[in-house]
Amino acid sequence: METLLLPFSPRYIVLTICAVVTALLIGIGIFDHNHKVWEVLLIPVVIFGALTLLGIRDLLQKNHAVLRNYPISAHIRFLLEEIRPEMRQYFFESEKDGMPFSRDTRALVYQRAKMQLDKRPFGTQEDVYREGYEWMHHSVAPKALSSAEFRVTIGGPDCPKPYSASVFNISAMSFGALSPNSVRALNSGAKKGGFAHDTGEGGVSPYHRENSGDIIWEIGSGYFGCRNRDGSFNPEEFARVAADDQIKMVELKISQGAKPGHGGVLPAAKVSEEISKIRGVAMGEDCISPATHRAFSTPLQMMAFVAEMRRLSGGKPAGFKMCIGHPWEFLAICKAMLESGIYPDFIVVDGNEGGTGAAPLEFMDHLGMPMREGVNFVHNALIGINARDRIKIGAAGKIATAFDMARAMAIGADWCNSARGFMFALGCIQSLSCHTDRCPTGVTTQDPTRARALVVPLKTERVYMYHHATLHALSELLAAAGLEHPQQLRPIHFSKRTSSTEVMSFAKLYPSLRPGELIEGTQDPRFRDAWAMARADSFQPVG
């Protein structure tokens, strides 16, 4: 009996209704001798017949269990799942809880990029008594707003061509991940605003060159744009490209915050003629970005490679970008600096909260040190080897507002890079579809019909305005704190609530080493054991 009633159960009732209605409609049409009723019934027969066939297919297919048990009706689940991100973002997300960036932060970037009113009414929506709330201290003797540009000179004693950089620049994003129009607008905005544009590891494309904005050329493990046919580093090609006056600094990518230790492959089918030319890879072959570098394998060799990059570029600032992983590995690099006498001009610290076009979930969520801890670790390590005055530190990882910048600079950064902040300025709506090539705003796509949505002259202005307005907001914060330049920021200017009744200064949360303390022998538990494990001739720990 149960088997006979199964077609009328909630699981199968939709299919049963569609089948019965289809049969009834066909029967009515058959017994209509004038055949005029088909003029009315044809469309309903097609609709219900198609649904019946869909239900039969659902019953027989083997990929989705829910469709086998709920033919036809289970498709509603897939539809709702498809539109869930949009429903959540537009109807259920509060101003503060959106991820990776809250609606409030996204709106702030949009407003500043469009030079619209970026003020908020009625008071903060932050719970200032929640654990983790952070604030900046103000002064009873605030300064007048500074009219000076906030810039930092990058280039140590061994660098004959130092670069005066803005304290706020465009972080590494490759052409290929970004559309041609995105690259054009970002570089044009950087040109107008006098700030730098990091190419990402995908190489220097024609779109980077069109508007002559300052470029930081990033070299990854694939050596795109300066490689031999076998994928090894080509020093002659590197020197040729780096000689371009538009390239102001050269940066060696060791790891990326969102997926440290993870290589990548662009399948041969996606290697277009344009990408082949830009990256120096052959058509019809996979474009491989290995997890490790072939040009060096030890800290000492890495420092020698950085020195070679500086020499080949004609004396431009040379440094590296990394997300901090094993502490002893970065300290091994520090020991290599001391042993070789070779120092990079800058280090960009990428946090695991940083963005990417696509990465495994485990890598994004649980691998690598967050930016703030990473910046402070590098800052203190350089102090500990007496090298902090000659090496500048850049911070990258979820930076979008002036407060984000001030906080990072207080704990050790000399300048900040932002990727997704500038993507919002271009029009990104955080649809989280970067990896699908179906970006709805034309920012992260190679589909020309989608990329055309991004109008370069308009977005150039918005990139420029976002940078300008953010630095103006930073100037206001500094003035309120009684400061004149972000280089004056220190941990004592910030506090964090560690419980509902306890507050700690950043000075206690991020204590500083003494100059030369690592060389002398530190007892600081953050560094003591890792320093003892580090060795200049290998990334492997001692013992």
Image (tube, helix red, strand yellow):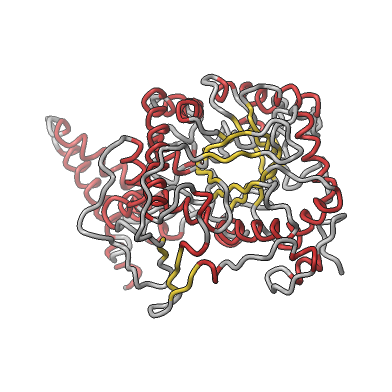
Q: Residue furthest top?
A: 210
Residue at 75 percent of width and 70 percent of height:
522
On screen, residue 131 versus residue 244, left or right, reads left
Q: Position of residue 2 (x, y in %)?
A: 33, 72
- Quadrant hosting residue 8: bottom left
Q: Nearer the viewer, residue 429 or 467?
A: 467
Q: Nearer the viewer, residue 422 or 306?
A: 306
Q: Position of residue 282 (x, y in %)?
A: 72, 26
Number of numbered discs overlaid on the protein picture: 0
**Residue 78 in view (yes/no):** no
Q: Nearer the viewer, residue 310 or 358?
A: 310
Q: Residue furthest bottom?
A: 501
In the depicted structure, whether residue 176 falls above or below residue 142: above
Residue at 28 percent of width and 45 percent of height:
118
On screen, residue 458 versus residue 175, left or right, reads left
On screen, residue 541 versus residue 129, left or right, reads right
Q: Quadrant of the N terminus?
A: bottom left
In the depicted structure, whether residue 499 falls above or below residue 139: below
Q: Position of residue 46 (x, y in %)?
A: 26, 38
Residue at 59 percent of width and 33 percent of height:
199
Q: Position of residue 64 (x, y in %)?
A: 46, 56
Q: Nearer the viewer, residue 126 or 508?
A: 508
**Residue 176 in view (yes/no):** yes
Residue at 54 percent of width and 71 percent of height:
508
Q: Quadrant of the C terminus?
A: bottom right
